[in-house]
Image (cartoon, rainbow, N blue to C red):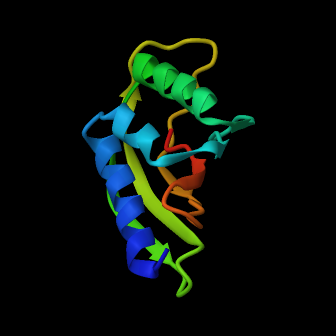
Amino acid sequence: MTETETESLIRTYYAAFGHGDREAMLALLAEDVVHDVNQGPRERGKAAFRDFLGHMDHSYRERLTGLTIMVDASGSRAAAEFVVEGSTWRPTPACRPPAASATAWPRAPSSRLRRAGSPG
């Protein structure tokens, strides 16, 4: 992917997050996606990420602001930085402390994201 294509992929992913379109988010992930959960374990695979999204939707109401995307010239490495605004909706024992800001390090060597950091 080119630098422009990688940035577009990441912007599309975060736009889907902003619209609450979890299926669109999942469609942009590789089957073997690696997810580094904020203040949690590393998870692997799209099924685990779908479960994570279900937990997030049940427990939190969040939106991201100040999205900044950085992509290297090869288009194979990128980072996204943003501020998380929101609240815990239905706390569970698995809830994590609220995040004030976050950085994700998406890897996009193909047309799907292969690594994702969680916003919350």
Residue 62 visible in the current orientation:
no
State which quadrant residue 107 falls in.
bottom right
Q: Residue at x 53, y 87 (%)?
A: 73
Q: Nearer the viewer, residue 2 or 11?
A: 2
Left or right, 74 with respect to 2, comes to right
Q: Nearer the viewer, residue 89 or 5?
A: 5
Image x and y of residue 118, in percent: 55, 43
Q: Tell me if residue 98 comes above or below residue 106 in the rendering.
A: above
State which quadrant residue 41 falls in.
top right
Name the residue at the left extreme.
19
Q: Residue at x 41, y 60 (%)?
A: 10
Left or right, 8 with respect to 34, comes to left
Image x and y of residue 44, in percent: 70, 37
Residue 3 visible in the current orientation:
yes
Q: Tell me if residue 101 comes above or below residue 89 in the rendering.
A: below
Name the residue at the right extreme.
41
Q: Residue at x 58, y 50 (%)?
A: 116
Left or right, 47 with respect to 4, comes to right
Q: How many marks?
A: 0
Q: Nearer the viewer, residue 110 or 72?
A: 110
Q: Residue at x 51, y 46 (%)?
A: 29
State which quadrant residue 27 falls in.
top left
Name the residue at the bottom extreme.
73
Image x and y of residue 86, in percent: 35, 35
Image x and y of residue 87, in percent: 38, 28
